[in-house]
């Protein structure tokens, strides 16, 4: 599992490293993209099992407070854990052959598209939550 996560972080890192806007924060952006993908799938699973009540926060809170809660409760602890378990130097210095990187990029792209598609289908078919 560790090797798979390292590979996913590496793929995200290389993607963000190519852009002029994110090249200086490619490692941090890779971690946040990885966490976003995890949370997207977590919310999808909670939605499938009709268990979104398990998520902290309230829909009656103002929108800015909901964003703040999401950042503090979900992404900050996740970022701290992932950045400690998968150090920047380790991810940056990983080496993979080109064919594995191409296959990984295609698989990751398809997985992200599938995750969004699944979430949208669930949102439309199941109606509003809470």
Image (cartoon, rainbow, N blue to C red):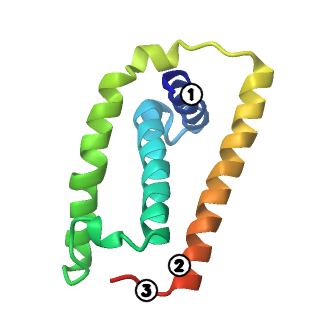
Above or below, 85 against 73 in this view is above
Q: Residues within 10 Å of mark 3 (few under 14, many from 20)?
A: few
Q: Residues within 10 Å of mark 1 (few under 14, many from 20)?
A: few
Above or below, 102 against 55 in this view is above
Horizontal side of residue 94 vs 2, given as left or right: right
| Farthest residue, direction front | 49
Say which label, 2 or 1, has the lower sequence index: 1
Whether residues under marks 1 and 3 lie with C-beta atoms below 8 angstroms apart, the answer is no
Q: Residue sitting at 31 percent across and 39 percent down?
A: 79
Q: State the image coordinates of residue 57 (x, y, percent, origin top left).
A: 21, 69
Q: Which residue is mark 2?
A: 123
Whether residues under marks 2 and 1 lie with C-beta atoms below 8 angstroms apart, the answer is no
Q: State the image coordinates of residue 118 (x, y, percent, origin top left).
A: 61, 66
Between 114 and 67, the residue placed more toward the observer is 114
Horizontal side of residue 98 vs 109, given as left or right: right
Q: Which mark is residue 128?
A: 3
């Amino acid at each position: 599992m560790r090797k798979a996560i390292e590979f996913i972080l590496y793929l995200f890192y290389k993607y963000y490293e190519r852009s002029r806007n994110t090249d200086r924060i490619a490692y941090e952006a890779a971690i946040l993209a990885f966490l976003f993908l995890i949370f997207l799938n977590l919310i999808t699973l909670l939605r499938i099992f009709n268990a979104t009540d398990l998520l902290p926060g309230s829909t009656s809170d103002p929108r800015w407070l909901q964003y703040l809660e999401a950042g503090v409760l979900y992404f900050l602890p996740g970022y701290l854990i992932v950045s400690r378990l998968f150090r920047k130097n380790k991810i940056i210095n990983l080496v993979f052959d080109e064919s594995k990187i191409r296959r990984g990029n295609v698989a990751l792209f398809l997985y992200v598209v599938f995750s969004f598609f699944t979430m949208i289908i669930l949102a439309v078919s199941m109606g509003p939550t809470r």
